[in-house]
Amino acid sequence: MTPVMGRPRAVRPAGAHRPALPAVINKRAGGTGLITGRKAFQRPTGEGVALLNAVQDVYLDERITVA
């Protein structure tokens, strides 16, 4: 992460309609992963698993590269 005014950058949640967008932004910025948890675990099991799978798919997709 690159410090901005002494603080690390944070990727803000994108909302329910684009749950993997923060992962795409992070990967394109050179990140290697996200801390996921509350957003996935406060949802019904099926939705939470789908969210975690979507984030994993971003990091496994070789077409998404560093900007």
Image (spheres, helix red, strand yellow):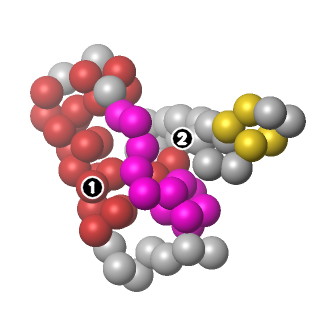
Rendered position, 50 above or below 24? above
Viewer-closest of 63 and 4: 4
Residue 23 % position (x, y)? 45, 52
Residue 59 is drawn in which quadrant?
bottom left
Q: CA distance from mark 2 to mark 1?
A: 16 Å
User: Marks 1 and 2: in contact by CB < 8 Å?
Assistant: no
> Which residue is disc 1 drawn over?
56
Amino acid residing under circle 2: Ala
Residue 30 % position (x, y)? 55, 64
Q: Seen in the image, is 25 located left or right of residue 53?
A: right
> Which residue is disc 2 drawn over?
14
Viewer-closest of 3 and 48: 3
Res 24 visible: no
Q: Characterize the local packing of mark 1: few (<14), some (14-19) or many (20 or more) Cα atoms within 10 angstroms.
A: some
Q: Which residues are magenta?
A: 24-36
Q: Secondary structure at mark 2?
A: loop
Badge nearest the viewer, 2 or 1: 1
Q: Earlier in the sequence, mark 2 or mark 1?
A: 2
Residue 4 % position (x, y)? 80, 41
Q: Seen in the image, is 27 located left or right of residue 8?
A: left
Q: Which residue is depicted at the point 63% across and 75% down?
A: 67
Q: Which residue is depicted at the point 59% across and 41% down?
A: 11
Reply yes or no: does residue 30 show up in magenta.
yes
Res 46 visible: yes
**Magenta-colored segment: predominant secondary structure:** loop
Q: Which mark is residue 30?
A: none
Reply yes or no: does residue 26 show up in magenta.
yes
Q: Secondary structure at mark 1?
A: helix
Rendered position, 18 above or below 43? below
